[in-house]
Amino acid sequence: MSSVILDSTLTCPLCGNVKTERMPTDACQWFYLCEHCHAMLQPKPGDCCVFCSYGTVPCPPIQEHGKQGGGC
């Protein structure tokens, strides 16, 4: 099994701002404030966190167990 990637680049769907962030390993991140347009991002329906919705890399639990594992 490959190692879990902890950095993911989030892209704001409203303004297109991109920023690489470190994902938490002990909790879901349900909200993310875009530092450019100040939009409060929330997960899309069916996703467990903002990294799964707007990031280049899904959250650590999804990387380890897949969507069937329940997510964060």
Image (cartoon, rainbow, N blue to C red):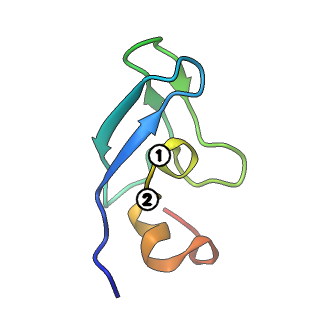
- The residue closer to the viewer here, 25 or 14, is 14
Screen quadrant of the N terminus: bottom left
**Circles 2, 1 touching at the beta carbon (< 8 Å):** yes
Q: Which amino acid does label 2 sit on?
A: Cys
Checking the image for residue 59, the label placed there is 2
Residue at the disc numbered 1: 55
Check disc 2: other Cα within 10 Å, few if <14, some if 14-19, many if 20+.
many
Distance from Cα at disc 2 to Cα at disc 1 = 9 Å
Residue under the image location 46 percent in, 13 percent down: 38
Q: In x, y percent, where is residue 24? A: 31, 53
Residue under the image location 57 percent in, 77 percent down: 69
Which mark's residue is nearer the viewer, 2 or 1? 1
Q: In x, y percent, where is residue 45? A: 72, 47
Q: Answer with the quarter of the image where residue 60 lies.
A: bottom left
Callout 1: SS: loop
Q: In the shown orientation, is residue 27 left or right of residue 68?
A: left
68 above or below 40? below
